[in-house]
Image (tube, rainbow, N blue to C red):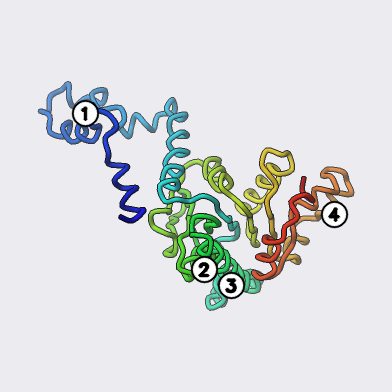
Amino acid sequence: MSKATKRADTRTQRRHALRDSHQDIETARHIPQTPQTLSPTYRLAFADDDFLCRDELRPVRLQLELLKPEMAMNEAGVKSTVVLFGGARIPAPENKAKARTETLANLSHYYDEARKFARRITEISLEQGGDDWIVTTGGGPGVMEAGNRGAAEAGGKSIGLNIVLPHEQAPNQYVTPELSFNFHYFALRKMHFLMRARAVAVFPGGFGTLDEMFESLTLIQTKRMKPIPFLLFGRDFWEKVVNWEMLADAGTIAPEDLKLFRLVETADEAVEAILNWDHSAAK
């Protein structure tokens, strides 16, 4: 019996003798329609979308958004992850002619580096049994697609943590379907990015990438999270976007905070940095 079959059997096993909630949902669909049964108050609370979306139910929705991915990852045997953050607008090299700016076109080689990096990380994961070092991205296009694509090319699984946005957003085709998630709350999504993270790789990107990078660094800096290998792909990009030395010189960060991350250019350099990371330097 496969792991997937065993997990499915576990989910369907009854742990008590009480009536199953799915049975009541189905039964409720066939009750006589009367003024009483048609009233919204008569709906089963856990099957009432209008009720679950009320402002007062926000704590419940937060809990559900924490639990659903957590349970699915546990059932899939995910023990640890390697997280890729990066821009959704960075094109694959073969599509760089369609980039909206020359800079985006020039950054397209990081799509290939993200793809190579994810492929190598997944190969290492498979060598160890396939449950550790699972590539995890935001599940969208650009660098995220490259990460999931590289993992798929290596024959491994990968995670996509998508989020509902005002414009249409769909997971890329390379995310492992049973590890493809959709979020309402950015905060819970970022929490899932880091809960199992063994390393973080940040590629060039915009506001979302900056947000993810700085929140992760802040958690490590303030010791709310254990130090892990933290790699920024693209020295020229990141040194233009953030004047790291000025922050240290100004005293707004400590000089040792510059040791929390490392600037790299290639997938090979990043993998070597992870395998030989000096964790004591970041403590």
Q: Give the crowd class for mark 1: few <14, some 14-19, many >=20 residues within 10 Å.
A: few
Do the CB atoms of the residues marked 1 and 2 lie less than 8 Å apart?
no
Image-quadrant location for residue 267: bottom right
Q: Which element type, helix, strand or loop, lies under badge 2? A: helix
Mark 1 vs mark 4: give the one in front. Answer: 1
Label 1 or label 2, whichever comes before in sequence order: 1
Q: Which residue carries the number 1 mark? A: 19
Do the CB atoms of the residues marked 4 and 2 lie less than 8 Å apart?
no
Residue at 42% x, 36% y is: 64
Residue at 27% x, 39% y is: 13
Label 3 or label 1, whichever comes before in sequence order: 1
Quadrant for the C terminus in the image:
top right
Residue 188 is marked as none
Q: Which residue carries the number 4 mark? A: 245
Label 1 or label 4, whichever comes before in sequence order: 1
The percent coordinates of residue 222 (x first, y second) are: 73, 39
Label 4 or label 2, whichever comes before in sequence order: 2
Residue 112 is marked as 3
The percent coordinates of residue 63 (x first, y second) are: 46, 33
Q: Can residue 147 be seen in this snapshot?
A: yes
Disc 3 and disc 1: Cα gap in Å?
53 Å
Residue at 66% x, 41% y is: 225
Label 2 or label 3, whichever comes before in sequence order: 3
Q: Is residue 29 left or right of residue 85?
A: left
Q: Give the amino acid at mark 3.
A: Asp
Residue 150 is marked as 2
Q: Which element type, helix, strand or loop, lies under badge 3? A: helix
